[in-house]
């Protein structure tokens, strides 16, 4: 079974948006975050990752906030207790901090 798949998601108000799904339960823990950031970096603004996990990935969110403040949207699709699904959408290129997180506002 393929761990990562791309699925078109229809938005009734616009063209379909490609969503990459990553089931981290099937990936070695030491590989997860690097793979997620690699896939996120490959997204165009408006595209999203759907993550599937067996826990709330709060440490991952903290990394996203440090790495790309205002550059992503984090939405829970399902919030446990046994299964967690969330969507991380890449925002417009201007949404992330240009100074690597050292900006004042």
Image (spheres, rainbow, N blue to C red):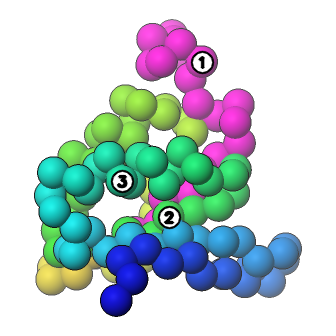
Magenta range is 86-105
Marked residue nearer the N-terminal end (3 or 2): 3
- Please tell me which residue lies in front, 37 or 95: 37
The residue to which callout 1 is attached is: 98
**Badge 3, how many Cα within 10 Å: few under 14, some, many 20+?**
some
At which x and y percent is residue 20?
52, 70
**What residue occupies the far bottom of the structure in this picture?**
1
Task: Give how far apart the Cα atoms at labels 2 and 1 are.
Answer: 22 Å
The residue to which callout 2 is attached is: 49
Task: Give how far apart the Cα atoms at labels 3 and 2 are.
Answer: 11 Å
Look at 48% across and 18% down and name the residue there. 100
What is the secondary structure assignment of the residue under circle 3? helix
What is the secondary structure assignment of the residue under circle 2? strand
Q: In which quadrant is the N terminus drawn?
A: bottom left
Q: In this rendering, would 92 be left or right of 27?
A: right
What is the secondary structure assignment of the residue under circle 1? loop
The residue to which callout 3 is attached is: 35
The answer to whether residue 12 is seen in the rendering is yes
Q: In this rendering, would 72 be left or right of 81?
A: right
Would you say the residues marked 1 and 3 are in contact, meaning their CB atoms lie under 8 Å apart?
Answer: no
Look at 53% across and 13% down and name the residue there. 99
Look at 66% across and 81% down and name the residue there. 9
| Quadrant in the rendering for residue 105 | top right
Q: Which is the main secondary structure of the residues drawn in magenta?
A: loop
Q: In this rendering, would 19 be left or right of 63?
A: right
Within the magenta stretch, is there residue 26? no
């Amino acid at each position: 079974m393929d761990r990562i798949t791309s699925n078109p998601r229809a938005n009734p108000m616009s063209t379909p948006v490609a969503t990459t799904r990553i089931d981290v339960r099937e990936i070695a823990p030491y590989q997860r975050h690097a793979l997620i950031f690699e896939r996120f970096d490959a997204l165009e603004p408006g595209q999203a990752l759907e993550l599937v996990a067996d826990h709330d990935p709060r440490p991952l969110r903290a990394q996203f906030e440090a790495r790309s403040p205002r550059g992503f949207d984090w939405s829970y699709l399902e919030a446990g207790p046994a299964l967690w699904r969330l969507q991380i959408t890449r925002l417009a290129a201007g949404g992330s901090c240009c100074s690597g997180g050292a900006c004042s506002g």
